[in-house]
Amino acid sequence: MVTYRAVRMGFGNVGRAVATLFLQRGTAVERDHGVAVRFVLVADRSGAAVDPAGLDLQRLLDVKARTGGVAAYPGGGRPGLSGAAAIASVAADLLLEVSPTSVRTGEPGLAHLRAALNRAMHVVTANKGPLVGAYRDLMRLAHERGVELRYAGTVAAPTPALDLARYALHGAVVESIEAVPNATTNYILTLMEAGYALEDGIRAAQDVGIAETDPALDVEGWDSAAKIIILANTVMGGDLRLDDVDVEGIGAVTTAQLTQARRQGRALKLLASVRRGPRGLHAAVAPTPLPVEHPLARLRNTAMGVLFHTDLLGDLLVSVEGDAPLGTAQAMLRDVVQIGREHRALS
Amino acid sequence: MVTYRAVRMGFGNVGRAVATLFLQRGTAVERDHGVAVRFVLVADRSGAAVDPAGLDLQRLLDVKARTGGVAAYPGGGRPGLSGAAAIASVAADLLLEVSPTSVRTGEPGLAHLRAALNRAMHVVTANKGPLVGAYRDLMRLAHERGVELRYAGTVAAPTPALDLARYALHGAVVESIEAVPNATTNYILTLMEAGYALEDGIRAAQDVGIAETDPALDVEGWDSAAKIIILANTVMGGDLRLDDVDVEGIGAVTTAQLTQARRQGRALKLLASVRRGPRGLHAAVAPTPLPVEHPLARLRNTAMGVLFHTDLLGDLLVSVEGDAPLGTAQAMLRDVVQIGREHRALS
């Protein structure tokens, strides 16, 4: 049995889902996979909750729901304790990083990752920003410290898109990748295909909790760009950053275009792609009419998929549809289990 | 670096593909993943080729092509040495099992697996028979000896269908599985959809090397049955055997049925499925008209796919289309790499 003492930075939607998942399945995972997690510090904007013996996750969820912050945790509240200082304040061997983080600057997640890796803690993150801005640096730092940096939750989380690189593609070469990795825009495009105008589609997506209050990151294509970068860097050995991707969102897509595409037997998707070119990897995000027989064309609503064009294994598709509210949390859990099985606890 | 001394039983299509793959990619895999394989014994019907320092795979392929058997390997040929005796004749820590083996009796593969596991050798097999007949026994034996038994090559090999259970589904419950796991029947049905009669479809599939000379195993559904059993036992904790599956092949399917299904917006597929029922797992194989929006409906020609209905992760699809002639060999290679990364060489 490996038991990790974990710090979690962030207690928003994903943070709550992580807590819920460990409450529901933590015992089964311990039994089935021999990996246990004891949360010794959880931080949010209010400060931190600390207990070296392990926080009570249900109590933490209750406190958060009641007071809006974890700093009111009975007996272990530390108002104002945050960031790298919080990480340095406890003995721990694992960081789960889910704090609200900018895709462009990577902060504050990036600072958290560096602080944890420098302390030789394993890191599991659901934040794309740090990976988009500093992928090679972070991987090098993790390697130097002999720890793992995992991030299955960053790309089409319920699918094993990123796990493939580590566990299934050995010896094969990925020549290109095509993906529909952003559920929000795919949902909006599905509504537009049914006649909605863009703004109405966005509003409807917000009403059902699929789109953020500020939908720009999704609608303008930056979320998809971040995901194709992470795929390219992980699976194709790239070193791409956000500036390296040609990005066009769905802001200029019209209902008429969608209707016309459909009439021509095509489905308009916000496609993220990367291929090997004469000057290295070339990545792009753009609304693209896909022929109906294309493996990604049938993904509707909040479905997501990633298609790997390989030399030895044909065209491999992984996709997800239907409800997976704990998908990102489960991706982080599987990262933790994989690390636990491959390493012993460091202390 | 982990270096395995490997015995390979079988040198048919898959055996040749394994040799070709290791010749082409072995060095890259050593460099990227730190796992190397030295083949110390390779056996086929003619006997064995033996070299404790490692056989020359290119020479082995040449001898096989020239003489039809490995026993003519210069300096290391052992005519007549076969089966468990061959496995016991050398010091080795890994068995790659690809000998022609009955899906019904599991032999001779089953004897090879038992011999190797009893010698505390890791086993990687592409044979379904032993797993269909003795899954729990074999897993128990492997566990007792502290070694791994892996078989990614047995089900929809180019896809990570079986890897999912080990590396991606932690904490999630698979409620049911639907699969189109047999490329041969899918190819025949695609031809029948275009108007071919069953026998003409079978002949065409044989002409392009997709169907065996004796196509019964595929056409009657037994190959699909074996695959859904392996999926159910691996991913859903089952203990199913061949007799537990309701099997109907495509022998009674008519061109008219396919045309009619298509007219109704459906695609007729040989569907293998398993679900949890009141009395445990219930598995079946049957020609099934799928609505066009079903994730498996679009798989045509030799495409294959497996759809996992889960509680936490929605409906997960993995599928493959296009050429993957080394797919099974690569699945065995990834099994070896995974074992190598998780264990040290035993000696």
Image (tube, coloured by chain):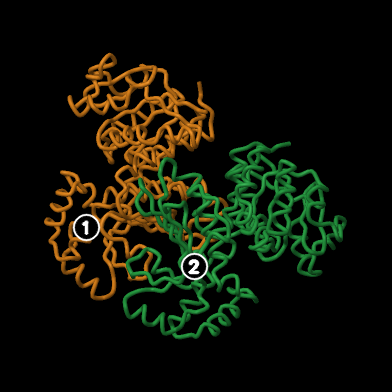
Chain colours: A orange, B green
In-image side of B287 versus A76 (left or right): right
Identify the residue position indicated by label 1 in the image. A250
Classed neighbour count for the residue bearing mark 1: other residues with Cα under 10 Å, few (<14), some (14–19), many (≥20): many
Q: To which quarter of the image does residue B214 belong?
A: bottom right
Q: Which chain does tag 1 point to?
A: A
Residue that numbered label 2 is attached to:
B322
Q: Is residue B42 left or right of residue B140?
A: right
Letter of the chain that mark 2 sits on in the rendering: B
Q: Nearer the viewer, residue A229 or B50?
A: B50
Labelled pair 2, 1 in contact (Cβ < 8 Å): no
Residue drawn where x is 23% and y is 49% of the image: A218
Query: Residue A83: where, in percent of width, then height?
Result: 30, 24
Q: Is residue A39 above or below residue A274?
A: above
Task: Kindly give the residue lying farthest to the front in the view shown.
Answer: B279
In the displayed structure, B31 sits above or below B201; it is above
- Residue A177 visible in the snapshot: no
Identify which amino acid the numbered label 1 is placed on.
Ile
Residue at x 27% of width, y 25% of height: A60
- Secondary structure of the residue carrying tag 2 is loop
